[in-house]
Image: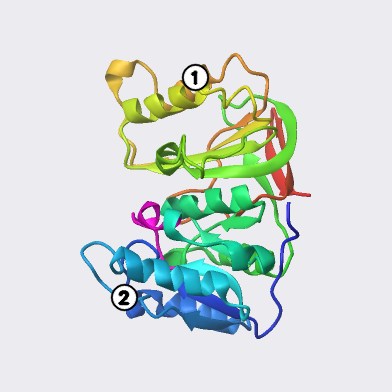
Amino acid sequence: MKKMNFLRKNDKIGIISPAGRVTEEGTSFAINTLKSWGFEPVIGENCFGSYGCFSGKPERRKNDLQAMLDSDDIKAIFCTRGGYGLAQIINDLSFEKFKKNPKMIIGYSDVTVLHNAMANLQVPSVHAPMLRGFSTTPANILNHIKNILVGKFPTYRIDSHPLNRCGEAKGEIVGGNLSVLFGLRGTRFDLNFKNKILFIEDIAEKAHQIDRILWNLKIGGVFEQISGLIVGQFTNCLEDESLKQTIHESIANIVAEYDFPVCFNFPAGHVDDNYPIVFGIPSELKVEPYGAECKSL
């Protein structure tokens, strides 16, 4: 795993919209927040573009991201929002210059595509709120993001959950949006799950679809390889009474035969309380009867 490059005062942060479209007004709070932290936001040429539900045609979105990946001046890259679109451009990106000068990429949801790419390059990345959501993100979580950018990692203590499974796990955290992970299975951007702590979350999916994806992971041997499981928020996901189990119960039953620790209801995903998680660096998960603790080492 490559060393994480942290930011210093006046460093430049690239701002891009590699998927869904946003307005300049919708990101103004976040841009001003980054400035107040002492950084210099650099807006991608196509950041506020519009093409259907996207911020631009695939070529334009790819060019914006490629420019930020290649730039020696840009020290981190923030995505403005997710939605859908990174799968359309990821295969056409070149990471040759980036590998010589890696930098943090921050985002979640559809940005899981980039997190997978970073994991394959052995470059740390940050699963965290994106700029469009900064205005509704609690101050303590914004402070966590600021601290991570400069190399100060938080320790999270999570309330207990009746389906938690106790134990300790060490390893790099990988994962993100479950549906996006599923879309990359069998591609060159699929993850190496061996000895990793897997984090999953999703939004607006039906319970049977989540169950199907989890069975794909099980049949594919993923759960035989991981050292721990963190179950984030499944926001607006439709429960299905015909399954005779909730989404959480489905997850618990599918991984019941394994002995790794499982932490349910972790506060990360498509919610305002979206705790930032650093992917790709040594981390530790402890699940005990009174709750769970997760931290970077």
Looking at the image, what colour scheme do you see? rainbow
Residue 198: x, y in percent? Answer: 59, 37
Q: Please determine whether, in this image, residue 111 is positioned above or below residue 234.
A: below
Q: What are the residue bounds of the magenta stretch?
A: 80-90
Compared across the picture, whether 58 is left or right of 105 comes to: left
Q: Please determine whether, in this image, residue 222 is positioned above or below residue 81.
A: above
Q: Looking at the picture, which amino acid does disc 1 mark?
A: Ile
Pick whichever, 14 or 297, lies toward us: 14
Pick whichever, 42 or 237, lies toward us: 42
Q: Tag 2, which secondary structure?
A: loop
Q: Quadrant of residue 23?
A: bottom left
Residue 255: x, y in percent? Answer: 55, 20
Q: Residues within 10 Å of mark 2 (few under 14, many from 20)?
A: some
Q: Is residue 271 visible?
A: no
Most common SS among magenta residues: loop
Mark toward the start of the polypeptide (1 vs 2): 2
User: Pointer 2: what residue?
Assistant: 23
Q: Tag 1, which secondary structure?
A: helix
Q: Looking at the picture, which amino acid does disc 2 mark?
A: Thr
Name the residue located 63 percent from the left edge and 83 percent from the top edge.
38
Task: Tell me the distance, in whole angstroms, between the alpha carbons under discs 1 and 2.
Answer: 42 Å
Nearer the observer: mark 1 or 2; the answer is: 1
Compared across the picture, whether 182 is left or right of 293 comes to: left
Residue 37: x, y in percent? Answer: 62, 80
Q: Please determine whether, in this image, residue 23 is positioned above or below residue 217.
A: below
Q: Is residue 67 magenta?
A: no
Q: Please determine whether, in this image, residue 189 is positioned above or below residue 273.
A: above
Pick whichever, 196 or 239, lies toward us: 196
User: Pointer 1: what residue?
Assistant: 219
Q: Residues within 10 Å of mark 1 (few under 14, many from 20)?
A: few
Q: Is residue 85 visible?
A: yes
Q: Residue furthest right?
A: 297
